[in-house]
Amino acid sequence: MTAARRDRRSARGSTRGRALVRWFRRRARPLPWRRHPDPYRTWVAEVLLQQTRVEQAAPYFERFVRRFPSVRALARASEAQVLKVWEGAGYYARARHLRSAARRVAARPGGALPRSIEELEALPGVGPYIARAIASLAFGAPVVALEANGLRVAARWSLERGDVRRSAVRRRLERRLLAELPSRSPGTFNEALMELGETICRPVAPACGRCPVAGRCRAYRELDDPATLPRRRGHAPRPLVRAAVVALEADGRWLVQPRPRRGLLGGLWEFPGGKIAPDERPPAAAARELREETGLAAPSLVPVGVVRHAYSHFAVELHVFRGRLARRVPPRNARARWLTAESFARRPRPRATEKVVALLRATAHRSGGGAPPGSGSRPGRTRASAPAAAALRRRRSPPRGTIA
Ligand code: SF4
């Protein structure tokens, strides 16, 4: 093959690559990050899509770029503002890293995202995949960007039987795809590969009958069931963490506190509480956690219900208790605050805490006191009167709600 022919072929990519790109140009879904694409929007979308499915990510993306339309706008925002806009999307470290990285980018000459993979990877929260995705989608770099969907498609195309979570297997798949990459449109090829994986070459029951490259797919041609690739190991059951949570009220306010900045849900606000020990009953755990975290004790803690929430690697079962103090007492934790419900709602909160608040609101009329904080009642009315407090203490098995 002459050098000129080789160059032309590399510019257009393989026959399969060209078919894939043609299909994508005709059938790409009108996703919000595909409108008015620019490096910043591509970056935000890729970060969101790392742990979130496309249909879930779309509204979060729109909300995020509406509130922070540029790197500079994001760099100017406080961490709490960014977390609040990210609220509900989960994996909050992504939002914190995005903001830190935006501050670094804004401080660069010109304030633009770097183009090289090395410089992109040096930004907080930008790993090898996101760096390659930004470099190819936003700047046309001739590199392969492989996430879970692309890996699955690539493994089926080439009948790869190795474990795609192993880096040697991933590198092998990348090398094979690199030979197919059209140097004229590497970003479109990468995006098309992901689109095929998300919409047609799905993990279970791939729609091979609608696949634009079925004729050039080894799994389709040689296997009874292409879905057997890539090989999967069975998932271990998610461990369950049991915890007690205390919604302590005084003067129409709740006592709440931010989580430590480092670690799961870092910087998000929640009620005091913590794990229930293996031999401990939930009421005892609630009283202990309240004492240990805040130095406070409530005259009585009334069980309100149980909230369940699943994270990627574990599930939580939150036993929720309501307590009241006659007046606000400064907690031992200097970062804790007595907040109205409205003020608490403006702080970034984990989804599980949202569920706890919903449960408290739903059961406010049954838990012997007035309305929950911030529900419109005057502060004095949320205190339990002496008869009501006595009734609370007498109640042996209060109604339990469950929010899952
Ligand atoms: S033919 Fe089937 S298995 Fe192969 S890429 Fe298309 S959808 Fe996936």
Image: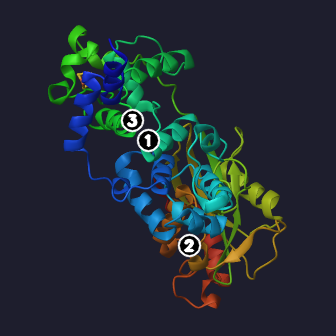
Residue sitting nearer the eye, 257 or 279: 257
Residue ID for mark 2: 345
Above or below for 6 versus 55: above
Q: Residue at x 53, y 80 (%)?
A: 371
Q: Residue at x 75, y 82 (%)?
A: 327
On the picture, is 286 further left or further right than 143?
A: right
Q: Amino acid at mark 2?
A: Ala
3D distance between C-alphas at marks 1 and 2 = 42 Å
3D distance between C-alphas at marks 3 and 1 = 6 Å
The answer to whether the residue bearing label 1 lies less than 8 angstroms from the nearest atom of ligand 1 is no
Q: Amino acid at mark 3?
A: Pro
Q: Categorize mark 3 by other alpha carbons within 10 Å: few (<14), some (14-19), many (20+).
A: many
Q: Give the colour scheme shown.
A: rainbow
Point out the residue furthest to the top here. Answer: 222
Residue ID for mark 1: 140
On the picture, is 232 further left or further right than 96?
A: left
Q: CB atoms at circles 1 and 2 under 8 Å apart?
A: no
Q: Categorize mark 1 by other alpha carbons within 10 Å: few (<14), some (14-19), many (20+).
A: some
Residue 162, percent from left and from top: 46, 12
